[in-house]
Image: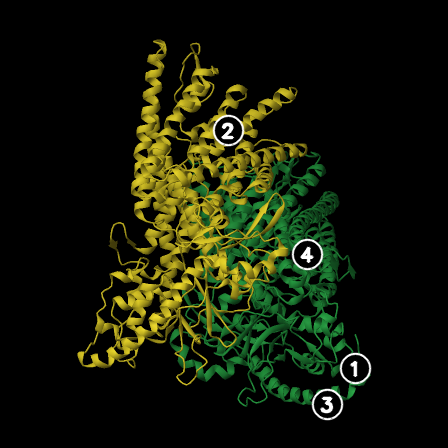
Chain colours: A green, B yellow
Amino acid sequence: MNNSNSSLAEGNSETTCDTAQLISNDEASTSNYGQLNNHENYQDTEENDLHGSHGVRRRQPIQKIEPGSMNILSAKYESLDYDTCENHLLLDEERKRGYPFIVWKDMARWFIIMLIGMVTALIAFIIDICIEQFSDIKYMELKKFVDKYVLMDKLYIPYLLWVLSNVCIVFIGSVLVAYVEPVAAGSGIPQVKCYLNGVKVPRVVRIKTLLVKTVGVITAVVGGLAGGKEGPMIHSGAVVAAGISQGKSTTLNRDFKIFQYFREDHEKRDFVSAGAAAGVSAAFGAPIGGVLFSLEEGTSFWNQALTWRTFFGTVVSTFTLNVALSAYHGHPGELSYPGLLNLGKMEPFPFQFYELPVFILFGGIGGFLGALWNYINYKLAVFRIRYITAPYLRVIEACLVAAASATCGFLMMFLLNDCRPLGEDPTKVPLQLFCADGEYNAMAAIWFQTPEASVRSFLHDPIGSYQPGSMLAFVACYFLLSTWTFGLAVSSGLFIPNLLTGAAWGRLLAIAMQAMLPSYTINPAKYALIGAAAQLGGVVRMTISLTVIIIETTGQISNALPIIITLVVAKWTGDFFNEGIYDIHIQLAAVPLLPWEPPPLTHNIYASEVMSHPVFTLRTVENVGHIVELLKVVTYNGFPVVDPPLADDAEVTTYKRLRGLILRSQLIVLLQNKLYNENANTTWSNFNVKMNMFRREYPRYTSIDKLEISDWEKTCTIDLRPYMNPSPYTLPHRASLPRLFRLFRALGLRHLPIVNDVNEVVGMVTRKDIARYRVWRHRGHMGMEELLLSSEI
Amino acid sequence: MNNSNSSLAEGNSETTCDTAQLISNDEASTSNYGQLNNHENYQDTEENDLHGSHGVRRRQPIQKIEPGSMNILSAKYESLDYDTCENHLLLDEERKRGYPFIVWKDMARWFIIMLIGMVTALIAFIIDICIEQFSDIKYMELKKFVDKYVLMDKLYIPYLLWVLSNVCIVFIGSVLVAYVEPVAAGSGIPQVKCYLNGVKVPRVVRIKTLLVKTVGVITAVVGGLAGGKEGPMIHSGAVVAAGISQGKSTTLNRDFKIFQYFREDHEKRDFVSAGAAAGVSAAFGAPIGGVLFSLEEGTSFWNQALTWRTFFGTVVSTFTLNVALSAYHGHPGELSYPGLLNLGKMEPFPFQFYELPVFILFGGIGGFLGALWNYINYKLAVFRIRYITAPYLRVIEACLVAAASATCGFLMMFLLNDCRPLGEDPTKVPLQLFCADGEYNAMAAIWFQTPEASVRSFLHDPIGSYQPGSMLAFVACYFLLSTWTFGLAVSSGLFIPNLLTGAAWGRLLAIAMQAMLPSYTINPAKYALIGAAAQLGGVVRMTISLTVIIIETTGQISNALPIIITLVVAKWTGDFFNEGIYDIHIQLAAVPLLPWEPPPLTHNIYASEVMSHPVFTLRTVENVGHIVELLKVVTYNGFPVVDPPLADDAEVTTYKRLRGLILRSQLIVLLQNKLYNENANTTWSNFNVKMNMFRREYPRYTSIDKLEISDWEKTCTIDLRPYMNPSPYTLPHRASLPRLFRLFRALGLRHLPIVNDVNEVVGMVTRKDIARYRVWRHRGHMGMEELLLSSEI
């Protein structure tokens, strides 16, 4: 910085002028900002005529925003920017480094993906082993107490011990989640989905989140909750990817100074997408399913090269996990060992043409039960948002559910005397309870193991292993427990509990069919699998990725066709009632997620109605004081850079010709590094500005309030041209909403300046402006609704 | 039309004026059109300085365009337009029909997809059965002759009969392809890939093509060529989709007046993508592989809803095919019958950690052999393009290959006395030849069946079924035959021949390994499968979709990990040498295919260099005579609509402010329906113009030369505003090539007007302008090259 006090005088006069200008802008802005929040208010009268006939459900303006409403978008989420800022610095770097750098970057990407796959698999391995070991210890100890006290008729003692152990274990995880990192709650899939869609959910890919998630999921499953480890593993993969690819960690406060070239939203998002896929791959041993999950649930951008790299990552992940697990299971290196499959190797089952109605029926039941599960969970979630807000309340609720789970299990073991002879089925902890010698309690065997092991039992146990009465009780109990569990302040997913519920009712229906058709031999394993798929499909509404995951995790493709048919019907049925559980939770969090397609029949909504205006612009060569004041006054993250109005042109006062777009983060870095000059004519080349200056700060930039800018500095100017994006995508004000939407969605934009006929900025469109137009479909009807924007939630 | 002769006088004067204006435009245009073709000429001097340092391989302008060069783009291909034209007619229709129409359209889409799946499956079934039946007859008859003449030592008689039958059968298919529909040659996958990328390859989705393809593929396989039926089945699926979804056929000259709302490039392309997926699904019994194929190889647009519909289509297709085939095989309705799998049900094979190097080695060999196969085929293709151009020559070549195939087979049977005891392996037509009684000739068994059956033999026959010497001869022979066959004037694919070659060398290597490691039992089936995957992967360079297809068609997922590892290595190895075979053929056809990403380091190439200029514009209210002359003079398909220059504004003469974009096809329909008015002020609402007027003509519009426009009509005017696209996407002239590319690619555009700072059109960018910047990668090096544009090829 070549500051010099001699220029103070002229500088000052300029500042005064600019501050005055700013204040006038500012007044306009405050009113506008209010207007943005109540955007629907000022359009109400004008638009009713336009849209009235199309059945737009126009919400009445709500005075008090009700938390837990489904028709609110929060203004607090920021967007990721998939668009590259092609400023002079980037061009300069490219010119200097040339093609070898491109080749190097490409190789680095492959290397990072390999690391992501390996680390994700190792984390999954640790979670796996911890859950298995701790669960074994817990249930073996409890069994000793049961065996001891059942003879003394004092079963309440092992019951209380069970409750106590559950509550204590869950307490640890719940405290971590509620107090240390609330974003680690649940499965993490909705958050990852938002991130991949382009919404920056705060703290979702931090290492702290990963640590809490890992400990949390172990405690949740070991604590006997009706939750699974798969969702958290997927989230873990995403965090690992974000961490490794950026070469720095905010939590650890370390910058390893590697992979700096990947410090931009575009690259980071690609890696996170691959990481989530690696997570699925590690969770289910499903490399292909992982890629498909990432595509179906998340990635907004389809790209052959990215898909291929992702595939490589999932293969590395599965391979690493299988090598580790095969060693753990005592078959080192034997990668085809069937014990590596989460749900156990299914046998192929024959099926006939005339079974089609049965599969459709199962799909229908799964879709209906899934929709019901979602509905109950939604109501519970709203209740939680409204009333269980304090962390201590959330911890208490989690402990309550842990106690309830143990109580359910105990009551079933105690009341349903479902005895089976020992030795027929593989069960680790056979409890005799009230059964005769040489027999064990079938329900106790189900409850005294992890939910994943219970799914295996239902899928593989022979005919007649369970009584219909106990199955019915189990279905009802587990259905309610699992829907109560999802959304608690613990880290746990919903895949396994729903597979378990589905497998149970599938088996129950198989028993019923067997009773109705005694002349046939009905294979309960087959219908348990179909039921499991149907229930899970009805809840999450995934199709192709879920099919592949189930096929890969049961190691049997011969059953693909029935599973697919069931899943398609389950999705259709479920979609008739409500949305998938992840979408419900995303809406509850008021996240401005962009759907795949623009809402239909909105060609008559124009950019001029969608955009926020007037906009705050910066001039190509701008005064530092003005920039600082602007950044302090408004919360916007992108500012159009415009030509200064011509002095003699009286008309051009409000709108100015667009020259580029600059981000708040860029301005912050410029101010932080004092890249301004007292002399407006000095060009940027005087400073040794590097892309790395911006990369060092990515992704968390200092707040403007923390920068100390002296009065003298405020008189300097910055030439924004070398830093701004010189040719941002724009649209004319007469462009329609679908056109706006497609451009925004297809290119992953964050800001879209709207221009008039002579290329002057008249407004700005961000994700929230578009996301508030949403289509609703319900029981065959559809329409368009406008969501409220709120900065309170 | 309310014509009236009274206004003739004023009209005429206007015409004169306009024609004069047109002629002056015209002169400018002709020179510009020449400039477009030699675009690289006028940039040569100017750009060398800019790009020189980046290693741009700038081709020297070639005086005579050499057919078969890889650095030419043909100007004759038109593009599809994925962007919706949001004109008043569309808005009007939307407003009138409302949401129920959206719901109806959605249901119609599902119904159409179901039909596509079923029809595609039935066509695949017919091809399957015909090939099997005819082949059986052919080989049974030949066997009788062999058995008869081998005793008389006159084996030349069955040999000549074999040659004759091959040549005759192939002659039929070849004549059809060469004379009736040349686009039906080959597998059709490159053409479908181009179509999905957005290039309108002429006649590729016509019913005539489907008929020729169906007959062609039956004759090719029955005629004993080293070709497969899978590629043509995929192409068939695409044609079926295009036909059904449009509800009309040009070949049959019938318009069924159904599904008219889907008569636009956007919808049609989505259906074709689903149809191709259904084709894969029917060809391999691979519903998931079908969806992935469509995504990996073709679809440019990832959309969850579309993917789900596609998935439904592939499931319907597999289901229908399996129902039909199970009935044919005598197991009606038994959908889990293993005989339904193309390559037979594989047994799971155990594999160990330390086998990883073996899989990598196989992948490497496959990649190398695949690259070699591609190289030989490329050289042959160039030879064909240059010298075998006349249809009769192409027929002769096909017959020659048919004779050569029979000769190869005969020589192998005759010279390699590889005898096996009868009864151990399943073989339909066992030939004794010179073997002892109770034995049969193993090579004869391989040659006297379809290639698909031979793949099954190699994958499933027990250890020691074949001698290493005969395997080696077979690999060499079939490798060369298959690469010679692909590209002939017959309809046949390359999947099965490459699988067969790969299975053969895989088995050969297994025999070699067994000899080296006599203490281990090496399963030849395992390595045959890995070899087959490696060889095919090395040729086509698909990864995830090929993995899934192989898994689905062998009905065994336990082998997924080795297959995946092999395929990844095969692709890496192959990509080191050259491109995938489909891409090679697409480049040979000079198709302007857009890759997934813009070429790197092109941020310093600006829209102003890429665009063609000056542009031909139309005024918002334009004179009919001017439109007619313009359409006759230039070949462009899109014209910017601009404000007329203000009379008193002397500066604005060349550039005009952009108002919209209108297509040649729209202008033709307007002229055809005489939608013009003598009075410039009459608005469009006077006419009863409907979207259906445009849909009726889609996709083949009359040529301008066939329209009869009287002199009087030429004096009328058209108000283009209700028909044009009022807010096309535009970019400023200073936008970089990557920015241009991303917009164009992500939104599937056809025309992109380039504007200056005040929104006046200064140029136009089409697919060819962008596609000519291509990145080359070769043996670890990379760079950018500029292709030639040619209207000759």
In front of the other: label 4 or label 1?
4
Inspect the image, locate mark 4, and give the three-letter code of the amino acid beneath it.
Arg
Kindly report the distance in space between the C-alpha atoms of the residues bearing marks 3 and 4.
44 Å
Q: Nearer the viewer, residue B297 or B161?
A: B161
Are discs 1 and 2 located on one and the same chain?
no
Q: What residue type is labelled 3?
A: Ser
Answer with mark 4 or mark 1, whichever residue precedes in sequence: 4
Q: What residue type is labelled 1?
A: Ser
Check if mark 3's residue and mark 1's residue have beta carbons within 8 Å. no
**Residue that label 2 marks:** B459
What is the chain letter for disc 1?
Answer: A
| Secondary-structure class at tag 2 | helix
Would you say residue A771 is visible in this rendering?
yes
Side of B227 relative to B176 (left or right):
right
**Which residue is tagged 4?**
A97
Q: Which amino acid does label 2 sit on?
A: Leu
- Residue on which the image places disc 1: A710
**Coordinates of residue A481 in the picture (x, y in percent):** 61, 56
Task: Mark 3 and mark 4 in contact? Answer it, CB < 8 Å.
Answer: no
Q: Distance between the residues labelled 3 and 2?
A: 86 Å
- Residue nearest the viewer, comparing A37 with A754: A754
Residue under numbered circle 3? A13
Q: Which of marks 3 and 4 is nearer the N terminus?
A: 3
- Chain ID, mark 3: A
